[in-house]
Amino acid sequence: MARPWLALSSSNLTPFIQVEGLHYSFGHVQALSGIDLAVERGRFVAVVGGNGSGKSTLARCLNGLLLPQKGRVTVAGFSTDDPRALPEIRRRLGLVFQNPDNQIVAPVVEDDVAFGMENLGLPYEVMRERVPWALEAVGLQGMEDRSPSTLSGGQKQRLAIAGILAMEPEGIILDEATSMIDPQGRREVLEVIQRLRHERAMTVIWITHHMEEALLADEVVVLHQGRMVARGHPAEILSSPHLSRWNLVPPPGVLLAQALRDEGLSVPPRVVTVEGLVDALCPSG
C-alpha cells in the first residue's frame, strides 16, 4: 500500500542532514567535539563506536532533542536552533530509541501508532488511513486491537517504527534499536528497515555496536571519544586494523579471514562477510 511522500520545502541539491562543527558536553564530559557530517537523501549510514563514543548524543542532536552548544545542525534545511522548526524537524526525521518498552504509550497497538499523529494535530480521517498502512509496512497488520504488552521485543520495536512511519518522515534514526531484543527480533527490524530504504527511498541513520549490521549500510561513520575518526565504505572501515583502537570488534567474516591468513591462506583484502570469504576461496565455475 504505497503512499506519496510529502513535497520537500528545501532544495534536493542540499544534504538532508548537515552537521557543522558540532560540540556537546555534559558538564565537564565532552560528548561530541567538532563533528562535521553531511547525509544525502536516501542514504543508509551506520554510525558505530564503543561505549561513551557519543553515538546517542549525536542521535539526539540530529533530532533536535539536544541543541548544539557550538556548531549547527540542519535537517531538510531547517535548523535545530530555531524552536519554531523543531516540530517540523521531528516530523521529517523520526527517532527510535534503544528500549522498545520505553516508547510505547498506549494500551492498544493502533492507538500507539496514532499517538505521534495526534501530537501533530492531524485530522482523524488522516490517522484512520495511515494507521493500517503503517502497521502493514512493518508487518503488524491484524494486530490493531492487541495490547503492546503481548508483543515480542522485535514486534514492539516494529510498532515503534510504525508510529514514526505514520507521521510520514523523510528519514529515521535508530539508536541501538536492536541491542535489547533477541536475534529473531533483530532480523525482523533489519528486514523492515531494508524494505523501507529500498521501497520508499528513506534516509536511515543506523546507530549500532553490532558490526555485522553496519555491513548493510551505504557507508559507515566511526565515533571515538566524541570525534568522528573514520568514514567510508563498510568493507573499508570494518576491515580496518584500527578497529580495536576504536574499541570495536570486527564482524565474524573479518575475524575468520584474518585467522585464515595467519594460517598461510591467500585471502583477498576487505573480505568482510562469511559469504564473501566462501566466494573468494571457492569461486564457482
Image (cartoon, rainbow, N blue to C red):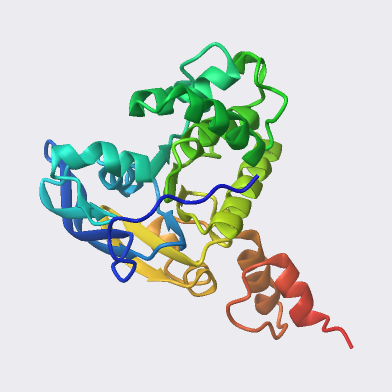
Residue drawn at (53%, 18%) of the image? 111
| Residue 84 in view here | yes
| Residue 60 in view here | no
Quadrant in the picture for the N terminus: top right
Up/down of 136 relative to 14, above or below: above
- Give 57 or 125, whichever is nearer the viewer: 125
Q: Position of residue 109 (x, y in %)?
A: 59, 20
Is 188 displayed left or right of 222 in the figure? right
Q: Can you name the residue that lies furthest to the right here?
A: 285
Up/down of 284 relative to 115, above or below: below
Q: Position of residue 86 (x, y in %)?
A: 23, 39
Quadrant in the picture for the C terminus: bottom right
Q: Can you name the residue that lies furthest to the bottom here?
A: 285
Up/down of 245 relative to 239, above or below: above
Is 139 displayed left or right of 239 in the figure? right
Up/down of 181 relative to 40, above or below: above
Is 135 displayed left or right of 70 in the figure? right
Number of numbered discs visible in the structure rendering: 0
Residue drawn at (50%, 35%) of the image? 166
Q: Position of residue 19 (x, y in %)?
A: 23, 59
- Give 272 or 177, whichever is nearer the viewer: 177
Q: Position of residue 230 (x, y in %)?
A: 36, 68
Q: Can you name the residue that lies furthest to the top here?
A: 107
- Give 18 or 3, whichever is nearer the viewer: 3
Residue drawn at (54%, 11%) of the image? 107
